[in-house]
Image: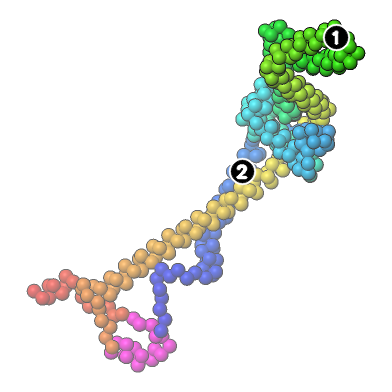
């Protein structure tokens, strides 16, 4: 016995092919329209011009640990940092101010690419105005390199200034202390007094040994005077030594800051745009290449959209067919408000009539509608 299930979810590949053949106008039309529109945009649009600037600064990558980009990933780090600097708001605004080109056009036309795994980079700019291509590339390379390396010089300069101010403050504090205590370099004075007392004591012993009482007494007076100076300087030394430690720390910080400034200036000189950048010739952009680069992706997107649209249309058609089939079957089977029975004789008669190969169960027609039955009852 054969059954037909209306609205079945079992779909074969043949069904997909049939649906594609029925909706062929959708699958072909949408990609063609999208591709034609993209082609018109390219062909009817203004002529574009492009040029490439090469950035090669091997002295900025690798080398000693004092450089900004070192290690095995130095080239990749430099490329990523330069690409980010080119499109940063600060650099874009500076280039826009230098060239008069709007910032949105700069962001849309600039492209940075690393050459292999090296530290060499290419900066390409595409625009409709040929006169702006070269100035934009020159200003972009200059501003991006300055953003990466001149800023380091500024930071190092600020560190030197801060260390110098700290050293000046520490030195002034020492001078104020010496003026307040009326003594200069008390640490050295304390050490010299200790040495003097030790020498006087040795002389005193020698004079006592030879019986020189007057000399021994004079030595004793000098020892007492020196000890009195030690007693006066002793409590003051910790504060003075703390000031000396601050001055020594500031001196060391200043030396380190000056070394960092020297290294930053060396890197900035190695990043001189006139030495590390070279600008190529400005040339018109090929429309054929632009067509291939734009039309193919647009056609692919249109084909995907067409496939999705066909799937939606087929689902809606199947859903509508399933609803219509269920409604028709219900109208045939339930006509008087109750289920219609299938006479057994009808099935037996059909089989006896020779329909041996067709086992499809056919429901008999309903003899009368509900209004007719009601009229008969009356």
**In the rendered image, which quarter is residue 50 located in?**
top right
Q: Is residue 81 visible?
A: yes
Toward the viewer: 291 or 253?
Answer: 253
Q: Quadrant of the C terminus?
A: bottom left
Q: Which residue is mark 1?
A: 213
Give 63 or 57, whichever is nearer the viewer.
Answer: 63
Q: Residue at x 39, y 62 (%)?
A: 320
- Marked residue nearer the N-terminal end (2 or 1): 2
Query: Is-magenta flag for residue 348?
Result: yes
How many other residues sit within 10 Å of disc 2, few (<14), some (14-19) or many (≥20)? some
Tell me if 144 is positioned left or right of 59 in this view. left
Q: Secondary structure at mark 2?
A: helix
Residue 276, x across and y down, in percent: 82, 30
At 72% from the left and 19% from the top, the residue drawn is: 241
Give the magenta-colored segment's residue range. Answer: 345-362
Q: Quadrant of residue 203?
A: top right
Q: Which residue is mark 2?
A: 38
């Amino acid at each position: 016995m054969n059954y037909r299930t209306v609205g079945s979810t079992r779909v074969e590949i043949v069904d997909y092919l049939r649906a594609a053949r029925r909706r062929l106008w959708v699958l072909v039309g949408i990609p063609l329209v999208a591709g034609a529109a993209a082609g018109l945009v390219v062909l009817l649009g203004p002529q574009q011009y492009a040029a490439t600037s090469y950035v090669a600064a091997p002295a900025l990558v690798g080398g000693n640990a004092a450089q900004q980009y070192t290690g095995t990933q130095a080239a990749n780090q430099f490329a990523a940092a330069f690409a980010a600097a080119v499109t940063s708001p600060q650099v874009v605004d500076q280039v826009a101010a230098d060239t008069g080109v709007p910032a949105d056009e700069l962001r849309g036309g600039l492209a940075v690419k690393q050459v292999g795994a090296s530290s060499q980079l290419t900066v390409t700019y595409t625009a409709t105005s040929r006169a702006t291509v070269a100035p934009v590339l020159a200003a972009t390379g200059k501003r991006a390199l300055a953003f990466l390396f001149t800023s380091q010089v500024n930071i190092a300069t600020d560190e030197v200034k801060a260390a110098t101010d700290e050293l000046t403050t520490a030195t002034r504090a020492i001078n104020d202390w010496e003026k307040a205590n009326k003594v200069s370099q008390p640490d050295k004075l304390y050490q010299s007094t200790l040495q003097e007392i030790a020498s006087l004591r040795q002389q005193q012993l020698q004079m006592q040994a030879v019986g020189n009482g007057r000399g021994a007494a004079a030595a004793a007076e000098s020892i007492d005077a020196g000890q009195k100076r030690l007693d006066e300087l002793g409590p003051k030394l910790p504060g003075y030594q703390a000031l000396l430690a601050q001055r020594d720390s500031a001196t060391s910080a200043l030396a380190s800051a000056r070394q960092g400034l020297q290294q930053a200036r060396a890197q900035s000189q190695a990043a001189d745009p006139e030495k590390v950048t070279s600008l190529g010739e400005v040339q018109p952009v090929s429309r054929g290449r632009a067509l291939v680069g734009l039309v193919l992706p647009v056609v692919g997107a249109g084909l995907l959209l067409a496939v999705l649209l066909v799937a939606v249309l087929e689902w809606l058609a199947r859903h509508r067919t399933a609803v219509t089939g269920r409604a028709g079957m219900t109208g045939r089977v339930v006509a008087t408000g109750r289920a219609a029975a299938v006479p057994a004789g009808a099935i037996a008669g059909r089989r006896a009539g020779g329909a041996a190969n067709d086992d499809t169960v056919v429901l008999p027609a309903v003899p009368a509608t509900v209004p007719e039955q009601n009229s008969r009852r009356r």
